[in-house]
Amino acid sequence: MQRGSKRKRVARGAARRSKSNWSGRARPQDAIALLKADHRQVEEWFEQFENTSSSTRKSDLATKICNALRAHTIIEEEIFYPAFLEATEEEDIHHEAEVEHDGAKKLIAQIEKSGPNDDYFDARVTVLAEMIKHHVKEEEKRDGMFAKARASDMDLVVLGEQLAARKAQVMGSDAEDDEAPRRSRRGGGRDAGMMARDPRRSRAE
Ligand SMILES: [Fe+2]
Ligand SMILES: [Fe+2]
């Protein structure tokens, strides 16, 4: 009885310390935890998309999915993938992941240009869900990128902080864009910015 009470007090103390250490904010996630949390979030939205017949809801979910995947691909390509390649020299895994991103980005751009009234809108979102499901499986499988990253000497805590900071920046610029007229955004604003930040482009040029 007393031992149990002591355990509870220790647990409560730990919870308090945890909260005060981070000033009430969520504890930072390491890089892989952050990327996996992104995966779970978009999976949930894809499932909701599949289960609704409301055009408004579909449109809202597609916007959330596209924005989240844009931020996710940017932070992986700019920060996590290069660190993974440097630490593991696993070129095949790295290159395949980037090629899969390129395919997803093309579909995301098409979804953003269309809407629920477009005959192909649902098909595009469904195919995107399948592509992302495959890609996530590759990243998270037993011998996949994340497992190899964990086994390497990558500093996943520092990378997690970098990913979180860049993600906040990208999501912030998305929110600013949402206030601009949609037409001007599609005229090359956000996508052009994304391309300009794509490190493979600068390497190729
Ligand atoms: Fe990912
Ligand atoms: Fe990825």
Image (tube, helix red, strand yellow):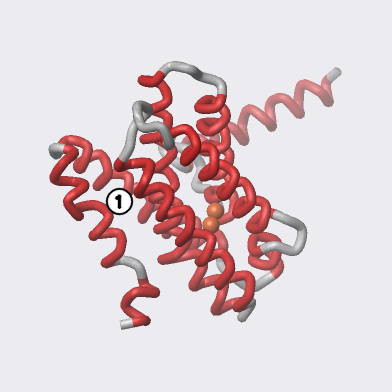
Specify whether residue 37 is in view: no
Q: Between 68 and 29, which is closer to the camera in this rendering? A: 68
The residue carrying mark 1 has its beta carbon less than 8 Å from ligand 1: no
Name the quadrant of the N terminus: top right
Q: Position of residue 189 (x, y in %)?
A: 19, 53
Name the quadrant of the C terminus: bottom left
User: Label 1 belongs to which residue?
Assistant: 169
Residue drawn where x is 63% and y is 75% of the image: 92
Specify whether residue 97 is in view: yes
- Three-letter amino acid code at the position of disc 1: Gln
Q: Position of residue 142 (x, y in %)?
A: 76, 58
Q: Quadrant of residue 23?
A: top left
Residue drawn where x is 35% and y is 67% of the image: 198
Q: Between 44 and 171, which is closer to the camera in this rendering? A: 44
Residue drawn where x is 62% and y is 46% of the image: 133
Q: Between 171 and 19, which is closer to the camera in this rendering? A: 171
Q: Is residue 85 left or right of residue 76?
A: right
Q: Circle 1 sits in a helix, a strand or a loop, which is it? A: helix
How crowded pointer 1 is (Cα within 10 Å; few <14, some 14-19, many 20+) is rated as: few
Residue drawn where x is 55% and y is 72% of the image: 95
Q: Quadrant of residue 15?
A: top right
In the displayed structure, 2 sits above or below 123; it is: above
Q: Position of residue 196 (x, y in %)?
A: 26, 67
Count of marks placed on residues = 1
Q: Position of residue 202 (x, y in %)?
A: 32, 78
